[in-house]
Image (cartoon, grey):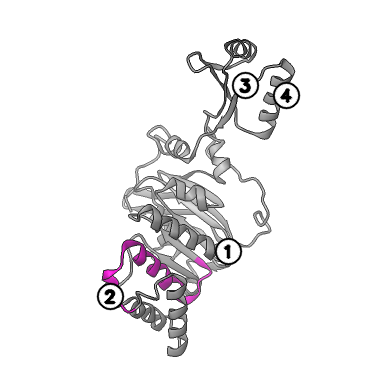
Amino acid sequence: MPSSVMPTPRRGDGPQSPAAVSAVGLRKAYGDKTVLDGIDLHIPAGSVFALLGPNGAGKTTVVKILSTLITADGGQAQVAGHDIATSPDGVRAAIGVTGQFSAVDGLITGEENMLLMADLHHLPRREGRRIAAELLERFDLAEAAKRPAATYSGGMKRRLDIAMTLVGDPRIIFLDEPTTGLDPRSRHTMWQIIRDLVAGGVTVFLTTQYLEEADQLADRIAVLNNGRIAAQGSAEELKRLIPGGHVRLRFTDPSAYRSAAAALREVQRDDEALALHIPSGGSQRELRALLDWLDSAGVEADELTVHTPDLDDVFFALTGPAAAPHQPKEDAR
């Protein structure tokens, strides 16, 4: 299996596109435990990048380094055009960070949390109140603004957390597992918020344990395992790394089933269901060739379905025990 996949060129992606985040050879160790062992990233502005990996893979460590909360032991990185080592203040002025655990103060109201953030950004009082009111309305929190944040649901606290992050108008936002613990409805609400942010030109760096989340949101995905990037690319590119895709042909006519089974090569038979499984990557070219063959042979299948590996398959293949057995284990940070 390839150790990485290069992305297919897309509009707005490539050497000429501005990088919101770039990193080369990032390394971090705690004692004799290597957490990051040479991480390379290129994240175009105005996109969603998802970093996947098992617990303890180093996802939060990457976020902490890029947001200047901790320093790397080696490598270089630029965020919003600022070097994380030589211009940390420039990085901090351009980003917002929402961690795994809410920064909301439950003892004060939602509005007071927002105004506190405005004060931390040294906004004039009138402007701070205006921005706080606009963001509370935008995140559907206006009616709850005067209530203590401790009374908010998990989804409301997460929305308030992101609203607080936006007070400083960051162009790059790091969201470290933003939907952990949320119910499905709140999670979908959060997804829409992220889509709206990106539509407004914000770059989102997302870490998540939910593979569907990455599939739904991310323009590019990287899988982190044992301190290294095991693979990166679009969701579809990653899925094509994993074998197991096939086309399923189902028949109601036993004679047509037998004829197709005899004529097709490398086919897996299911005599009980009168179905054939044909290995396929699911590309348009492969499907067209199969359909052309069926037409020329006069074989008519009653049902044709395409099955491709999903991100679950990719995740398990790239992060399982056999994925990188010689890499050092790393700290669960």
Q: Where is residue 164, by image quadrant?
A: bottom left
Q: Do the residues bearing badges 1 and 4 touch, measured as CB atoms within 8 Å?
A: no
Rate crowding at label 3 as few (under 14), some (14 to 19) or many (20 or more) other CA atoms within 10 Å.
some
Please tell me whether residue 299 belongs to the stretch shown in magenta.
Answer: no
**Amino acid found under the numbered disc labelled 4:** Asp
**Amino acid found under the numbered disc labelled 3:** Ala
**Residue 141: % across, % down:** 39, 72
Question: Mark 1 or mark 4: which is in front?
Answer: 4
Q: Which residue is mark 4?
A: 292
Q: Earlier in the sequence, mark 1 or mark 4?
A: 1
Quarter of the image where the C terminus is located: bottom left
Distance between the Cα atoms at labels 3 and 1?
A: 43 Å
Question: Mark 3 or mark 1: which is in front?
Answer: 3
Rate crowding at label 4 as few (under 14), some (14 to 19) or many (20 or more) other CA atoms within 10 Å.
few
Distance between the Cα atoms at labels 4 and 3?
A: 13 Å
Above/below status of 203 relative to 29: below
Q: Does the rendering let one see residue 24?
A: no
Above/below status of 147 relative to 241: below
**SS for callout 3:** loop
Q: Earlier in the sequence, mark 3 or mark 1?
A: 1
Q: Which residue is mark 2?
A: 148
Q: Which residue is mark 3?
A: 301
Q: Which mark is residue 199?
A: 1
**Amino acid found under the numbered disc labelled 2:** Pro
> Magenta residues, as a range?
146-172
Question: Mark 2 or mark 1: which is in front?
Answer: 2
Please tell me whether residue 168 belongs to the stretch shown in magenta.
Answer: yes
